Amino acid sequence: MGEAPDALDDLDDDGPRDVHETLLPSITLSILSKSDAALPYPGDLGVAEPAPVVAPAADITGERVRGARVGDLIGGRYVVEAQLGRGGMGRVLRARHQALGKAFALKLIKTPIAMDPRIREMFYREARLASACSHDNICSIVDFGEDPAFGLFMVMELLDGQTMHSKLRQGGRLAPKVACDVMWQVCEALRYIHTRAIIHGDIKTENIFLVRSPAARRVVKLLDFGLSRPDRATSGGAVDGTPEYLAPERISGGPATVASDIYALGVVMFELLTARLPFGGTLDEVFDAQLHRAIPPPSSLVDEALDERADEIVAKATAKNPADRHADVAGFMYELRTLMNMLGMETARRRPGNSDAGRERRDADHRTKAAYEVFASAPIPMAAVDLNGKVRIANQAFLEFLGCAGDVGGIDLRDSGMLEVYPTLFRDLAAAVARKATVKRVIYLSEGGGATVEVAVLITPAPGTAEVTAGELHLALHPLRHV
């Protein structure tokens, strides 16, 4: 029982492997191998715990930081030309890259908000995720960073058009066929990011942008991967999101999930068909309605007849219980396709000039989804974590190991029972980063009743080519045998 942490080269010769059922939350004891002391603490390796982000000196001293003006240079390369808009977290500017001569949309985060360590962490995380996405219906993120004078900024492709929110306010509700076409494209974008284990978290008409392609067809672009969500104070604490689109479980403090994105899709569909939001009033009134009142059928609020399937889609997507909603975006699209077919719309046609690109995108999406499905259903607990122990993604076996139910969002290994069974976890995470190599360890877990299982733990730094988990660590637990 005293194997060295790295003595795992012959795992295939160590007896029966099919003991996944032993890795259950009932495990109460961990006895690490005797060579624990072989791995130094992070400080001994020269690897420190990440320090809290400190606000710029000008903010600490109380000096007022002025907003960017026309002619200012941001990030050493973007010249401000005009202001395009203003939102909950800052301003959107038209800026031109000095060297390229190309115009972009540049979002500047408000200084008071940017000083919040949680907002800064969210900004960089979401910026990395969004910049890794490439899809016809997603606004491209091309650059991001921090300017010492103006703060956090993000650079996006410059779109010519208007938000869906603005169009509804100016022209009223959409015709059912137009609403379905917009919803289909939003779903295409959302399905794409969900297959990459990314949750949007702020689906709303203000984040749906309408542009015209060179072929004069309607193109929808999904904006802001959670980057425009100011905190909303409630009696239960702070809630991220836009109240009118928030699922009940998020108002109650739950994290953004696939199910909460589905809920927001239902609200958006209601809004496109009626040109109004389901619930209005004060913040508390909206929250109370989201928690306790069913969203009315869109057909009850418009003059012309709507197909009953539209009412059914909205009702299912906005069910109060997440389990009663569509299981995923594909399920929502299946019912939307039925409605579109009834309206005489063809959802399967390939648009002119885009068949090859569409086929390549579908193939890439299928490969990504297949990889995720293998990961999600693998019997070996696996996760991606950072040095602070925050979990980005984990499969079901890992959640069962921790004794968690539902979505992985918000899990912090420091707050879980993981350290009880693996007390040197954070030493090993730091060691893997310092060595830039896999750290292997054998631990022994007691199942109770005198039964003990030997488990191999492998911690591997994510490869530099990783689009989403670069800088993080991949963690896997492999049950070996009963001892």
Image (cartoon, rainbow, N blue to C red):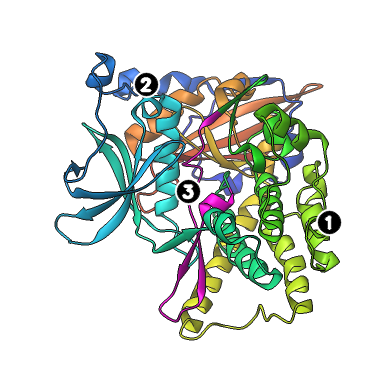
Tell me the quarter of the picture where residue 104 sits: bottom left
Mark pair 3, 2: CA separation: 25 Å
Foreground tag (3 vs 1): 1
Residue type at mark 1?
Ser
Earlier in the chain: of badge 3 and badge 2, it is 2
Q: Tell me the residue that label 1 is attached to.
A: 300
Give the residue at mark 2.
52
Tell me if residue 271 comes above or below residue 212 in the rendering: above
Please tell me whether mark 1 sits on a helix, a strand or a loop: helix
Q: Amino acid at mark 2?
A: Pro
Decide: few, some or many residues near mark 1? Use Cα within 10 Å; few <14, some 14-19, many ≥20. few
Q: Is residue 335 above or below residue 31?
A: below
The quadrant holding residue 101 is: bottom left
Depicted 280 relative to depicted 60: above or below: below
Does the magenta portion include 482?
no
Camera-side residue: 144 or 205? 205
Please tell me which of labels 3 and 1 falls first in the chain.
3
Query: Percent position (x, y) of residue 440?
Result: 48, 36
Disc 3 secondary structure class: loop
| Cα distance in 3D space between marks 3 and 1 | 32 Å
Q: Is residue 219 magenta?
A: yes
Q: Where the C terminus falls, by quadrant? A: top right
Q: Of label 2 and label 1, which has the lower sequence position?
A: 2
User: Badge 3 is on which residue?
Assistant: 224
Q: Residue 15, position in %: x, y?
A: 67, 44
User: Would residue 310 appear left or right of 265 to someone viewing this image?
Assistant: right
Label 3: few (<14), some (14–19) or many (≥20) C-alpha neighbours in 10 Å: many
